[in-house]
Image: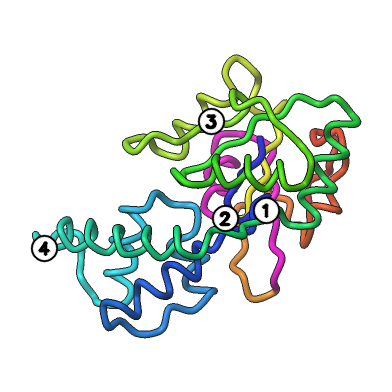
Amino acid sequence: MLDLDGTLVDTPHYEAWRSAARRIGADELTYPEYVAHIAGRPRLDGAARLLLLKKGRASANPRVAADSGALAEIKQREFLRLAAHTRLFDDALRLLERVEAAKQRVLFYTASRNAPGLFDAALRRAGKTLDPRAIVQQRRDQAREALFLRLIGEHAPDAVTLVDDAPHAVDAACDLGIRACQIRRHAFEPTAADPRATILPTLDRLDVPLNDFART
């Protein structure tokens, strides 16, 4: 199971959230803050977290729902403006080529409404196509754990490998007994807390078939 946003696709979510934060007069959103609090989460959840992080507005505040919606819309407009040249990470393209050569079954997942289309466009620019049924979209009301259980279906959790750049997603997978690997491309990014997680700096370090990697 491979995450799209930030793992395979170099999408401008951070830049869009940083611009949105500036638009509401918030302090600068740093990349480590983005990874720790916002990355990999649905847009409204990310907006609420940004408000709490930069404006000190707790979720119990009745204005937060309306403010989160407005902030999410600002972020989406910024994202669409920046997304025209979205591409795959270089190591992602190499991984997909290795997976294709090994004929391994892979499911892709994302919480982003934009990521499937951007992934498809980036693949086409790289001369590749993909069965759209291989991409699973997280529902708005669906917890990450529920998404993972849906993805693994009748497979035993420890027979499935998950690869994601978001530490909270990797921790959630480990809690379910899934073999999980975090791609941590930068040293300042937070790491998954679960000791069962494998932490790698690049997708090039993943062995194919993916279920053959060793835990660290």
Earlier in the chain: of badge 1 and badge 2, it is: 2
- Residue range of the region highlighted in magenta in the rendering: 166-186
Q: Position of residue 162 (x, y in %)?
A: 66, 39
Q: Nearer the viewer, residue 184 or 111?
A: 111
Which badge, 3 or 1, is on the more N-terminal residue?
3
Q: Which residue is mark 2?
A: 166
Q: CA distance from mark 1 to mark 4?
A: 35 Å
Q: Amino acid at mark 2?
A: Ala
| Numbered-mark total | 4
Cβ–Cβ below 8 Å for labels 1 and 2? yes
For label 4, the residue is 63
Pick whichever of labels 4 and 3 is earlier in the sequence. Answer: 4
Question: Which mark, by number, is residue 182?
Answer: 1
Q: CA distance from mark 3 to mark 1?
A: 19 Å
Q: Please name which of the two marks, 2 or 4, marks the residue nearer to the observer.
A: 4
Which tag, 3 or 2, sits closer to the chain's start? 3
What amino acid is found at the position of numbered circle 1 in the picture?
Answer: Gln
